[in-house]
Amino acid sequence: MPQDADELKRIRERKMQALLKEQAQQEALRLETEERIKQRETEREKIIEALFLPDAVIYLNELKQIKPVVAERIEDLAIALYLRGQLINRIPKTGVILVQRKLEGVESKITVKRRGEDEVSFYEAVKKDLAKDD
């Protein structure tokens, strides 16, 4: 019986060592993966700073806090344009806002409000003025 107890103890020690080794490997793999992710993020940030003007980078960083999906999509589009050679100049803040509005489906609206009248779209105001002239 003491021999069986010694054998069980050795088996337990081998299993424990194997588990510890596996945990160490998993931890090393996790750390390596995190390091790769950080490196890619750093490279992406450098590319973004090269493609966008400083005010646009600030705006994008603020947008990331509010609408991270939209901001990432804008960055992806800019990188894709650059890789295809279609991006000639650095992108200003107004360009970022324009793309953001397109992605969100927001259309620009020009409205006209005249004294004594309700606010109407520019199209409706011009249409009404043209009808008066006829």
Image: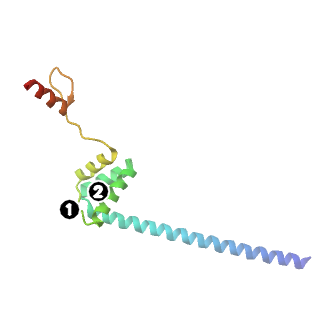
Q: Which quarter of the picture shows residue 113?
A: top left
Q: Where is 14 relative to 61, above or below?
A: below
Percent across and percent down for residue 32 are: 50, 71
| Residue pictured at 33% horizontal, 48% vertical | 103
Q: Which of the two residues, 108 or 133, is positioned nearer the viewer here?
A: 133
Which secondary structure, mark 2?
helix
Q: Which of the two residues, 24 or 114, is positioned nearer the viewer here?
A: 114
**Circle 1 crowding by C-alpha within 10 Å: few under 14, some 14–19, many from 20:** few
Position of 105 with respect to 110 (left or right) is: right
Q: Which quarter of the picture shows residue 23?
A: bottom right
Q: Quadrant of the C terminus?
A: top left
Which secondary structure, mark 1?
loop
| Residue pictured at 36% horizontal, 67% vertical | 43
Percent across and percent down for residue 124 are: 19, 30
| Residue pictured at 29% horizontal, 46% vertical | 101
Q: Quadrant of the N terminus?
A: bottom right
Q: Where is 101 relative to 113, above or below?
A: below
| Residue pictured at 52% horizontal, 69% vertical | 31
Identify the disc placed on residue 131.
none
Which residue position holds label 1?
Answer: 89
Which residue position holds label 2?
Answer: 57
Residue 48 seen from this side: no
**Three-letter amino acid code at disc 2?**
Val
Colour scheme employed for the rendering of this structure: rainbow
**Three-letter amino acid code at disc 1?**
Asn
Q: Where is 124 relative to 71, above or below?
A: above
Disc with the residue nearer the chain's start (1 vs 2): 2
Q: Nearer the viewer, mark 1 or mark 2?
A: 1
Position of 100 with respect to 2 (left or right) is: left
Percent across and percent down for residue 107 are: 27, 41
Q: Which quarter of the picture shows residue 123?
A: top left
